[in-house]
């Protein structure tokens, strides 16, 4: 059986002068803390090069009203890419909110230290961005695992700024007993019944917090999903929660530019209650506060009817129904490992679009009709014997649709589905992160190297050296190179590959224009790259398709490793620096070649990859790349990278 070749990662350390092109404003305080702003993103890096924050601010927004905060999995995890999530930003733009993620914020230390670091950072962000209101922003927050403890810590540290929160699969947090003001912040705690990481102790800790909190009139609700250490449907609940809580708590005339926002307090008796003992009954019992017939202190509290319906669909165990939209699917989230967990927003839909909502009820056949809701608002119903779907036209008045179903059986039994959310965008607003790139203005001279045809000596192979072996090309040889002729240039035959080889890769040729690279691959399995993924959420799967992954730096290993240069490292966990470039190029097949590749660099203190078509890479960077099938079991990639890249 054929096996796909794993990604080949090659480190090339090239000692040439780097001419940085990061167009951002950076400052270093006397404390050693660093701040950066490039017009879209605000970045913070502490003096120890450990804790970091990235925040996106909505463009063309005069006054920012609040901020989404995402915790991260693992004490040393990283949720800064949450600030780059274009789906979340579609919602944030409509709300006038920023989006922030963090790195190295251990959850149990947030209440005592981490939250102070974050809010002090907002003050400096306010100064360098010329958005003074950032210093006073209220927030919504979600986190899983360590991020759940982070969420709990933030809400207890600054409850006066917290609009709502969801803490997912967290084993607990600090403080042991929540502060009084935090109990007034609407929140939901969610655990997984089959969570092998935090186990029963996590569930017990949640129950302990909730018992204490609800006896003190906390506006909180627990849930145990039928899941492990994962998102489950918690983020679907959170997104509807954000929409509803901001509408209920953010004063219409509030202006953080004038100072802290006085959020509206919610009275307990205006909410709904959920019977947590009925999760496994087939349909969780919910009711308005004043109509709830059981012990109110033992019930979970929910903001309103919309949230009660959404909560019921998530908290009820073993739902036999499922809801889908034909025109788009749920967002796939690859950030699921305990050490890297953070969530992504759902699909984004245009207002006024006709969509088809389908019901899958194969596991519950005894039904007469099925109602479909957005929160608690009835969208339509399906009758037995008809098509198991309805069509609706999306409305711009909704920020978040959160779909649920309620079936009515012939024997009076009611069952529900798990929730699914998606956003409605404002077509007048733009939130995409598409930096304007200057055109590449240098001319490829093909003049050849001054060292061409001069005597040279062989250097023995040493995998630990930092020396680039680059053969000088004559002008005639350099003119042989083409990134569109589907063949390997003849000048590579001059290489003595007995001494010059890195795994399957022949080393390089160089001229005053730049570097020529040849990667020769022996592999009996060619994997077609699906170009339809380009520009979609599925583009994240690019690395699963037979990719060459190459890291190049403008300095030697010795310079990178020198403690004097430690602040040039993007983080202490990796040897990537502010000068490193990463190229990830899929091979494809002769019929289905990729149309582009991923190029990554520091922005400024986290590494971020962007996809460029080969045409755009040539136009803006002068990079030329060609995939070539050279034999039944061999293929090659031929590159030209100009020195201006470094």
Image (cartoon, helix red, strand yellow):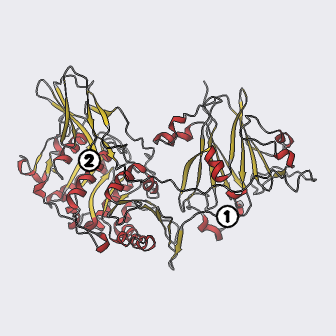
Name of the residue lying farthest toward the top: 385
Label tally: 2
Residue 196 in the image: state x and y as whole percent.
Answer: 37, 44
> Does dot 1 land on a helix, a strand or a loop?
loop
Residue at image point 18% right, 42% down? 377
Residue 138 relative to residue 551: left or right: left
> Does dot 2 land on a helix, a strand or a loop?
loop
Image height check: is 620 above or below 53?
Answer: above
Residue 267 relative to residue 624: left or right: left
Going from the N terminus, do you reach mark 1 or mark 2 first? 1
Residue at image point 75% right, 41% down? 482
Quadrant in the picture for residue 387: top left
Q: Which residue is mark 2?
A: 398
Residue 272 relative to residue 471: left or right: left
Q: Nearer the viewer, residue 114 or 470?
A: 470
Is the C-beta separation of discs 1 and 2 under 8 Å? Answer: no
C-alpha gap between disc 1 and disc 2: 47 Å
Residue 350 in the image: state x and y as whole percent.
Answer: 35, 43
Q: Nearer the viewer, residue 204 or 539?
A: 539
Q: Which residue is mark 1?
A: 19
Q: Nearer the viewer, residue 348 or 167?
A: 348
Image height check: is 444 above or below 374?
Answer: below
Residue 545 in the image: state x and y as whole percent.
Answer: 58, 36
- Please identify the quadrant where the N terminus is shown: top right
Tell me, yes or no, if residue 77 can be seen here.
no
């Amino acid at each position: 059986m054929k096996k796909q070749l794993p990604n080949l990662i090659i480190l090339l350390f090239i000692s040439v002068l780097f001419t940085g092109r990061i167009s951002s404003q950076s400052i270093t305080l006397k404390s050693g803390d660093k701040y950066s702003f490039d017009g879209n993103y605000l970045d913070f890096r502490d003096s120890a090069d450990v804790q970091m924050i990235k925040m996106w601010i909505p463009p063309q927004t005069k006054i920012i009203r609040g901020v989404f905060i995402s915790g991260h999995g693992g004490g040393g995890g990283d949720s800064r890419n949450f600030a780059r999530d274009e789906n979340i930003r579609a919602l944030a733009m409509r709300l006038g909110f920023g989006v922030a993620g963090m790195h190295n914020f251990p959850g149990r230390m947030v209440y005592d230290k981490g939250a102070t670091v974050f809010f002090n950072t907002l003050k400096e962000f306010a100064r360098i961005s010329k958005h003074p209101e950032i210093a006073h922003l209220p927030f919504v927050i979600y986190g899983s695992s360590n991020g759940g403890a982070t969420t709990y810590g933030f809400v207890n540290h600054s409850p006066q700024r917290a609009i709502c929160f969801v803490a997912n699969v967290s084993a607990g947090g600090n403080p042991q007993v929540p502060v009084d003001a935090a109990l007034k912040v609407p929140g939901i705690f969610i655990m997984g019944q089959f969570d092998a990481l935090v186990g029963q102790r996590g569930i017990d800790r949640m129950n302990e917090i909730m018992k204490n909190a609800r006896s003190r009139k906390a506006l909180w609700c627990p849930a145990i999903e039928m899941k492990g250490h994962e998102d489950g449907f918690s983020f679907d609940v959170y997104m509807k929660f954000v929409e509803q809580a901001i509408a209920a708590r953010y004063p219409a005339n509030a202006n953080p530019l004038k100072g802290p926002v006085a959020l509206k307090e919610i009275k307990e008796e205006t909410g709904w209650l959920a019977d947590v003992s009925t999760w496994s009954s087939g349909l969780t019992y919910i009711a308005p506060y004043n109509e709830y017939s059981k012990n109110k202190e033992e019930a979970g509290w929910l903001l309103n009817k919309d949230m009660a319906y959404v909560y019921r669909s998530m908290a009820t165990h073993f739902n036999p129904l499922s809801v889908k939209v034909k025109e788009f699917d749920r967002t796939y989230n690859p950030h699921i490992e305990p050490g890297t967990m953070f969530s992504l927003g759902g699909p984004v839909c245009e207002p006024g679009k006709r969509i088809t909502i389908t019901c899958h009820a194969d596991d519950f056949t005894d039904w007469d009709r099925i109602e479909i809701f957005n929160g608690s608002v009835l969208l339509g119903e399906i009758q037995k014997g008809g098509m198991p779907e309805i069509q609706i036209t999306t409305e711009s008045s909704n920020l978040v649709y959160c779909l649920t179903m309620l079936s009515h059986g012939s024997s009076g039994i009611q069952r529900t589905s798990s929730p699914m959310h998606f956003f409605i965008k404002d077509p007048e607003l733009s939130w995409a992160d598409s930096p304007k790139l200057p055109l590449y203005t240098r001319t490829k001279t093909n003049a050849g190297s001054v060292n061409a045809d001069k005597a040279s000596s062989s250097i023995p192979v040493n995998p630990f050296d930092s020396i680039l072996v680059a053969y000088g090309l004559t002008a005639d040889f350099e003119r042989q190179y083409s990134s569109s002729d589907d063949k390997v240039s003849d000048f590579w035959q001059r290489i003595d590959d007995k001494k010059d080889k890195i795994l399957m890769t022949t080393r390089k040729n160089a001229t005053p224009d730049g570097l020529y690279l040849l990667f020769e691959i022996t592999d009996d399995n060619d994997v077609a790259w699906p170009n339809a993924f380009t520009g979609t959420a599925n583009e994240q799967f690019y690395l699963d398709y037979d990719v060459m992954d190459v890291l190049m730096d403008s300095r030697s290993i010795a310079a990178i490793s020198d403690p004097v240069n430690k602040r040039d490292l993007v983080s202490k966990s990796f040897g990537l620096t502010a000068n490193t470039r990463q190229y990830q190029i899929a091979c494809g097949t002769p019929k289905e070649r990729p149309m582009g590749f991923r190029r990554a660099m520091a922005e400024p203190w986290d590494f971020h990859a962007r996809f460029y078509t080969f045409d755009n890479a040539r136009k803006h960077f002068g990079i030329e790349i060609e995939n070539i099938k050279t034999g039944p079991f061999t293929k090659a990639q031929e590159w030209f990278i100009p020195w201006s890249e470094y």
